[in-house]
Image (tube, rainbow, N blue to C red):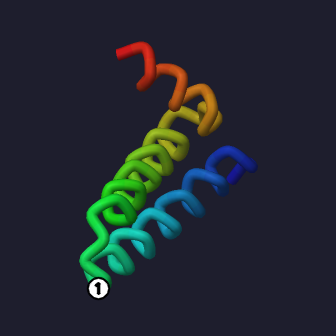
Amino acid sequence: MNSTELEGKWNQVKGDFKQKYGKHFDNDETFADGKFDEVVGRIQEKTGKTKEAIKEEVEKW
């Protein structure tokens, strides 16, 4: 496992935590941030791209 894949796993865990936190405290923004982090983590794990590269691609859409 390389560092990008590890970072992707971490982003998935972080995203899951934010989603649970957001639901518990009824905070939609935290939940949405968590969902985004989770998706970015999955993309990182599959493609090996950095989080910044993925964010740039999303912003171009």
Could you say which is closer to the camera, residue 21 or residue 38? 21
Q: Is residue 26 left or right of residue 48?
A: left
Q: Residue at x 42, y 70 (%)?
A: 18
Point out the residue furthest to the right here: 3
Q: Quadrant of the C terminus?
A: top left
Report the residue marked by disc 1: 24
Res 50 → quadrant: top right
Q: Residue at x 45, y 40 (%)?
A: 43
Above or below, comparing residue 60 to residue 41 in the picture: above
Q: Residue at x 31, y 83 (%)?
A: 25
> For numbered disc 1, what is the local secondary structure?
helix
Above or below, comparing residue 51 to residue 5 in the picture: above
Res 51 → quadrant: top right
Q: x and y percent of residue 52 in the render? A: 63, 32
Point out the residue furthest to the bottom here: 24
Q: Is residue 18 left or right of residue 52?
A: left
Give the residue type that dot 1 points to.
His
Circle 1 Cα neighbour tier, 10 Å, few/some/many (<14 / 14–19 / ≥20): few
Above or below, comparing residue 3 to residue 14 in the picture: above
Point out the residue furthest to the top here: 60
Q: Is residue 46 left or right of residue 50?
A: left
What number of labels is visible?
A: 1
Q: x and y percent of residue 28 in the render? A: 27, 63
Could you say which is closer to the camera, residue 13 or residue 23? 23
Q: Residue at x 42, y 25 (%)?
A: 58
